[in-house]
Amino acid sequence: MDSSVAQAISNETGQQQPFSPEVLQSITYLHISYAHTLDDLAFCHNLEVLQIMGCDPVDLNQLNGLSKLASLVIKCSALKDLSGVENLPSLLRFVAGMNRIEDLSPLLQCPELARLDIQGNPLSEHSYRTLVPQLQSKGIRVTVSDEPVWQMNLELQRHGFPFSFYKAHDGTRLCRPGLALTDLPDRSHPIVALEDLSALLSQDPEEVPKLFDRLDLMPTTFGP
């Protein structure tokens, strides 16, 4: 079991490894940060709410068996492939902001899904223009980046930058999803205006990664 997953279980239950089947099955809520695998979560059969922050990689197939999972939050985690989400039959709410998602088609097979947040992802043209409206036509409330922000995520991807660009309460920010470039992907998201980032990509792209070292760009308030 990944040490971060074990820590999350200990925080929730007050127990230490090895966890008995009874302890694992007693869990209905977990918040996991910075894990490298979600193996063994399938033993938490009664899990209803799962929050995943800054984990990498994330394989949704490792959640098979969580038939009661109603709310799933995966942020800043370099999630790329949504395959496996269709095996969560009770999923009502899915928040997957600031990841690396391109294809939304597996979500069409989620019969109970009612709310979806996919801001800050490099969605394909087909997903953004065709699948989002299809999901909305099924009655799903979809929150997605507006077109300029979405296009900037595609532009970052074209330049080879695995970053996420998203709109926050205090402006637009940059994020490094996953654990490849930082140990704390949910922290230190510089505030960068769209036009400034666009100019850097056009004129001096090697300066873009250095934005994460700019203390003058760091938000002074907590949270995205």
Image (cartoon, helix red, strand yellow):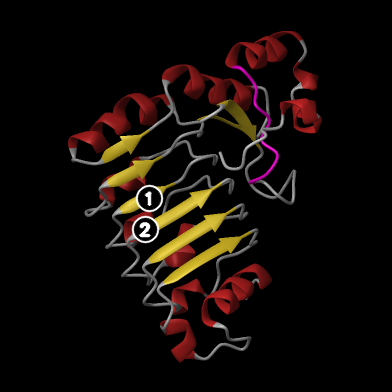
The quadrant holding residue 216 is: top right
Determine the residue located farthest toward the front in the rendered image: 221
Q: Residues within 10 Å of mark 1 (few under 14, many from 20)?
A: many
**x, y percent for residue 46:** 36, 76
Q: Which mark is residue 49?
A: none
**x, y percent for residue 222:** 61, 42
Rendered view: 218 above or below 36: above
Q: Is residue 187 magenta?
A: yes
Q: Name the residue that disc number 1 marks.
A: 94
Q: Report the residue at 70% width, 39% height from top.
A: 188
Q: Report the residue at 33% width, 52% height from top.
A: 93
Rendered view: 101 above or below 217: below
Query: Can the viewer see residue 106?
Result: yes
Q: Report the residue at 61% width, 17% height from top.
A: 193
Magenta region, residue range: 186-193
Determine the residue located farthest toward the left in the rendered image: 138
The quadrant holding residue 187 is: top right
The amino acid on which the numbered mark 1 sits, given as a three-letter code, is Phe
CB-based contact (under 8 Å), mark 2 and mark 1: yes
Q: Report the residue at 28% width, 55% height from top.
A: 92
**x, y percent for residue 69:** 35, 65
The amino acid on which the numbered mark 2 sits, given as a three-letter code, is Ser
Q: 139 or 190: nearer the eye?
A: 190
Task: State the separation of the CA atoms marked 2 and 1.
Answer: 6 Å
Query: Can the viewer see residue 84?
Result: no
Taking the image as shown, residue 177 lies to the left or right of residue 98, namely: right
Taking the image as shown, residue 64 lies to the left or right of residue 79, namely: left
Q: Is residue 135 magenta?
A: no
Taking the image as shown, residue 217 lies to the left or right of residue 5, namely: right
Q: Which mark is residue 71?
A: 2
Rendered view: 3 above or below 111: below
